[in-house]
Image (tube, coloured by chain):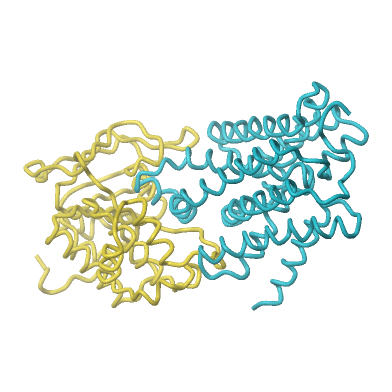
Amino acid sequence: MRGSLETHRSALEVVNLSVGFDQINVIERLSFEVAHGSAMAIIGPNGAGKSVLATALIGALPYTGTIRWEANTKLGYVPQKLDIERDLPITGRDFLRAKAAVACASQVDITNALGLVGLQMKSVGKPIGALSGGQFQRLLVAAALIGHPTVLLLDEPTAGVDEPGQDTLNNTTERLRKERGLTILFISHDLSVVYQHATSVLCMSRGRTCFGAPKRILTPELLAELYGAPVAYHVHNDLRP
Amino acid sequence: MAHPWPTTFTMTFDPNAIALSIGAGAAAGLVGCFAVMRRMTLAADAISHIALPGIGLAILLRVHPILGGVAALLVGTLLVWGIEGRTRLATETIIGVVFSTALAVGSLVTSGDELIAALFGGVGHLTTLEAALGLLLSLGVVVFVVWQRHRLVLALVSPEIAHTTGINVRRLNLLFLLVFALTIALGLRYLGVLLVGSLVIIPAATAKRLARSLRGMLVISVAVSIASTTLGTWLSLALHRAPGSMIVLVAAGFFLLSLLRR
């Protein structure tokens, strides 16, 4: 599955990756390559193994095959879902300070990260369990941005975020990619966002995978095959092929 | 008695015991915060029971019972951590099996007054060396929690985020469990195997109800813990009752008061 990206410096190479639980492979012999400074979307129906792939990519799950990150890669990671108690007395500020302390970042980095995701310092003074779903997702993205990451790996970063908030987050990651050369890997069910922001798409579905440019992957036929039903998505006029 | 394990509680004021109760209180208050936030409330109680066979064997071998208790706690903790890493069993299940086994072995090798003292604690007379070692251990626990608090927070919120920030989450978990076991050991003599878990859990649970930030929780938990140990000890002297029970009752009183808030 190595296409036009081969001419670029690779931020990530994955070769014959298999990940399984209890001797059942969720991901089997998956290979793809992500160019430095590109934005790769990972799409597919629920249960396809997208989050498992993300967890394996950060090295938090055992796997066979090869995952090769570019030298000196610094990962910023946003997990899909967190099991947080509502009454946990840890504020957003506590969380960001913890991230900054471990990543050797400064208070200025925290302020900058909050500005990038459109969160106010006052909001993060609340316990994280008291934040709205959207605020919490922005907090996670802000935390991922602390420590000057070279790669952002985002597992449904805009889940639960209102539409203006989604635009802010998507535009922020796009701007960081273009201005700072960050490589973005993001899992999304929003195919309009994928079409708008991804430079390549990895699709996963029940053992089948495909990889390529959005225009090649996001066709009605391939999407119907991928999701098992016709899928509609909105494409801005200025992006139409 | 050839060993220094008390079979009755002291009725005299002992500055060494008071100093150690403050040190152990501070350590328990801090460790308890992360134990409660990590949902280890029942595990804390169970882990403390693992000390019993160590205390029993130490008494049989005429070694200091606390040393036996500490050894058993550390071995038990490593066992729980090792089994957890090699199987997909829930931590609670593993702790449940190890704790029941330890309790069974402990009740076989300990008997009579010694068993009562091991289960419910006492103070007896603390030597300066015992108090100094206890305070040193307390200081070590306090330093660990303060030093590692940011890593513990990240691992608590998301082990995956902690992992990508360069934290070895599994090693951090082991270190926390070992520090937790040492904290339990600190309170063994005072509160005994059955009650020591409550010194770790109740002040932290009280603080969790009252605090709105991590710093607030740590400060409140330490304050409640030290207040419980010192006030409980004073009450035990005044009312001629076992210190362990009084300390836990005072801590429970603080928790009940916290329920009035919100």
Q: Position of residue A238 (x, y in %)?
A: 10, 73
Q: Quadrant of residue B248?
A: bottom right
Front residue of this view, candidates A197 and A114: A114
Q: Position of residue A93 (x, y in %)?
A: 41, 66
Rendered residue at 62%/59% (across/down) = B222
Which residue is situated farthest in the right direction here?
B112
Rendered residue at 53%/39% (across/down) = B175
Q: Which chain is cyan?
A: B
Q: Is residue A96 above or below residue B1?
A: below
Q: Position of residue B181 (x, y in %)?
A: 64, 40
Quadrant (top left, top right, bottom left, bottom right) of the C terminus of chain A: bottom left
Q: Quadrant of residue A197?
A: bottom left
Q: Position of residue B173 (x, y in %)?
A: 52, 42
Rendered residue at 35%/47% (across/down) = B164
Which residue is situated farthest in the left direction here?
A7
Left or right placement of residue A210 versus residue B183 in this view: left
Front residue of this view, candidates B101 and A220: B101
Q: Which chain is yellow?
A: A
